[in-house]
């Protein structure tokens, strides 16, 4: 049977081990909180980027539609004027009509392809699709950062629970989930579309 002196030493060792364990858990919580701050900041930035690109894409498609309508109206007017020019017997009037028709056809062609101003239908389509691709990339990043933030938050809760319950397994589980959060944050940075199937499945439900 252990004497009073030995019991005191055992108690001190237990307290020291407990104190050392709490310091490790406190460090783990601090690291998880740091990564949580990073993922939240990155997620907010990605969300803002997605919203900005979405607005820009919608504006570009609206401009495209307006230009398409003007192009269609001008093409129709040119066709109608061509019918009139074909019936015209006065050479001077016919020449003026043909000149007007030619100008309108040039404008229709310019509406279709205008590299000088980058505002032809062809250029607008390319710009809008590029903005949509950028928006989708930003949204994919945002979803990864959101999942990462959730993992870090769960890890912090589990680590805090270990302090209260002294269940060591909670600390290990917290660290494991924290690593998952770190992996998700890495995917958001370098492979944002890797988890697209999960986000699509979540959206479907």
Image (cartoon, rainbow, N blue to C red):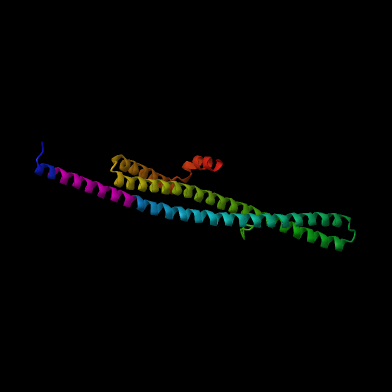
Answer with left or right where residue 74 lies relative to residue 170: right
Closer to us: 137 or 40: 40
Decide whether the magenta segment is chiefly helix, strand or loop.
helix
Answer with left or right where residue 102 lies relative to residue 2: right
Percent across and percent down for residue 104 are 75, 59
Quarter of the image with the N terminus is: top left
Answer with left or right where residue 94 lies relative to residue 15: right
Range of the magenta residues? Answer: 9-31
Q: Residue at image x 53%, y 41%?
A: 200
Q: Is residue 192 magenta?
A: no
Closer to us: 27 or 112: 27
The answer to whether residue 120 is seen in the rendering is no
Closer to us: 197 or 18: 18
Percent across and percent down for residue 160 are 33, 48
Q: Residue at image x 85%, y 60%?
A: 94
Closer to us: 71 or 193: 193
For residue 95, above or below residue 152: below
Answer with left or right where residue 26 lies relative to residue 119: left
Percent across and percent down for residue 9 are 13, 44
The answer to whether residue 46 is seen in the rendering is yes
Q: Is residue 28 magenta?
A: yes
Which image quadrant for residue 11? top left
Q: Residue furthest right?
A: 89
Quarter of the image with the C terminus is: top right
Which image quadrant for residue 127? bottom right
Q: Residue at image x 19%, y 47%?
A: 15
């Amino acid at each position: 049977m252990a004497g009073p002196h030995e019991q005191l030493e055992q108690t001190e060792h237990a307290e020291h081990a407990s104190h050392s364990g709490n310091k490790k858990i406190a460090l783990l919580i601090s690291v998880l909180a740091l990564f949580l701050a990073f993922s939240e900041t990155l997620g907010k930035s990605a969300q803002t980027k997605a919203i900005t690109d979405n607005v820009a894409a919608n504006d570009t498609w609206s401009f495209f539609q307006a230009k398409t309508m003007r192009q269609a109206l001008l093409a129709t007017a040119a066709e109608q004027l061509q019918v009139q020019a074909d019936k015209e017997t006065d050479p001077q009037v016919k020449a003026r009509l043909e000149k007007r028709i030619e100008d309108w056809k040039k404008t229709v062609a310019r509406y279709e392809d205008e590299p000088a101003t980058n505002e032809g239908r062809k250029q607008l389509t390319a710009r809008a699709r590029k903005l949509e691709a950028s928006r989708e990339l930003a949204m994919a990043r945002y979803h990864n950062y959101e999942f990462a933030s959730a993992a870090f938050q769960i890890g912090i809760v589990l680590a805090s629970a270990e302090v209260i319950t002294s269940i060591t397994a909670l600390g290990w589980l917290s660290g494991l989930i924290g690593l998952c959060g770190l992996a998700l944050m890495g995917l958001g940075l370098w492979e944002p579309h890797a988890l697209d199937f999960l986000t699509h499945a979540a959206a479907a439900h």
